[in-house]
Image: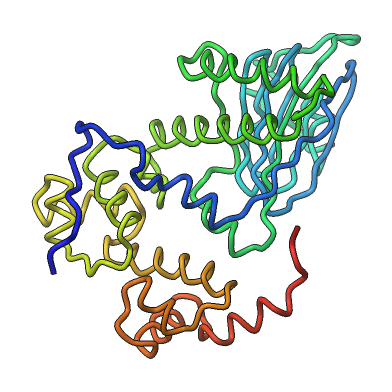
Amino acid sequence: MKSRKDYRSSSAEVPLDAHDPIRGALALARPQTVTPVPLHATAPWGAQFSPFPHIKLGVIVEGECWLCVDGLEPLFLSAGDFYLLGNPPPYGLGSSIEAARSRNPNEPLRKEIVASRPEISEGSVTYTCSVDFEFQDSDASTLFSSLPPAMLVRAGDADGKFLWNIATILVYEIETQKAGRSLVLEYLAQILLVHMLRSHAGSSHEPLGWLASVADDGIGAALRAIHAEPRHRWTLEELAKIAMMSRSAFAANFRNRVGRPPLDYLIEWRMQLARAALRTEDSLTAIAGAIGYQSESAFSTAFRRVVGMSPREFRVSLHAQPKGP
């Protein structure tokens, strides 16, 4: 079957109405944007946070602090540094590693950390601002499961300088109570998130899932094609042609970059769309057709294989969940 659309190479001009994978993923995840009260603290201080399905994006506006995420090395942050936590385990911020640790605060530090860790003098002031993207159900948070528990963009990085320009507006809006404040904060938070996701996709050597579509390369072009037309009966040959690679090179590169084979990814993305559609009143036949299945039974078989239950059972489970905002 021939696709109705041409998918240009990554170097071609992209129209403004092109399907945007980040926009699509955020729409499916339905995150609620929350702006916590800014943190003003004078050393010594510490704050601990419990895990829950969310992404936290923060910036050090003034001063310095330690970020300690369970299972990771402590991270020292200075003014202008940004951090992003993806569905993190318990974590903490503080004027020392001991104060920031959310678990085992008395656990001895490794010798190399003790020897090199910067000291924050007593009385030093730290000012941080952050934004939380909270997911209303655990299924939605799987869209961001490829994010690391913690990633940084330093003040001196090229991306850091750009992010700081946006953060100055965010800080201004957080500190003022002007009309439209909540709307401005929501859009600024989304802009910062998109740029942090771009930075991660451009620097990570780990499998990225759908985030690989952000990359301006052949694999990204193929992923954008899948996202734009999930109902199309894509073949490996078609996708390899869009990526401008041989069939074998495309299959290997796609798996390394995305984390799974191309046609497996297509099925899993269709099931993400199906989960969202099952929240509506659309019939199973209509949903099946919208995501590329010619019959309800074929759709149900694929859905059960990926999700672990039938579409009808999934829809019933949604009604049993508490309603989100």
Name of the residue lying farthest toward the bottom: 297
Q: Could you say which is closer to the camera, residue 232 or residue 219?
A: 232
Residue 7's x, y, as percent? 20, 47
- Does residue 236 appear left or right of residue 303 in this picture? left
- Tell me the quadrant of the picture where the N terminus can be found: bottom left
Image point 67% across, 23% down: which residue? 59
- The quarter of the displayed image where residue 202 is located: top left
- Does residue 249 appear left or right of residue 224 in this picture? left
Residue 137's x, y, as percent? 67, 63
- Tell me the quadrant of the picture where the C terminus can be found: bottom right
**Count the marks: how many?**
0
- Does residue 293 appear left or right of residue 13 in this picture? right
- The quarter of the displayed image where residue 12 is located: top left
Image point 69% across, 22% down: which residue? 170
206, above or below 93, in the image: below
- The quarter of the displayed image where residue 303 is located: bottom left
Q: Name the colour scheme.
A: rainbow
Image point 49% across, 83% down: which residue? 283
Name of the residue lying farthest toward the left: 246
Image point 8% across, 51% down: which residue? 246
Q: Could you say which is closer to the camera, residue 320 or residue 265?
A: 320
Residue 233's x, y, as percent? 22, 70
Residue 212's x, y, as percent? 36, 44
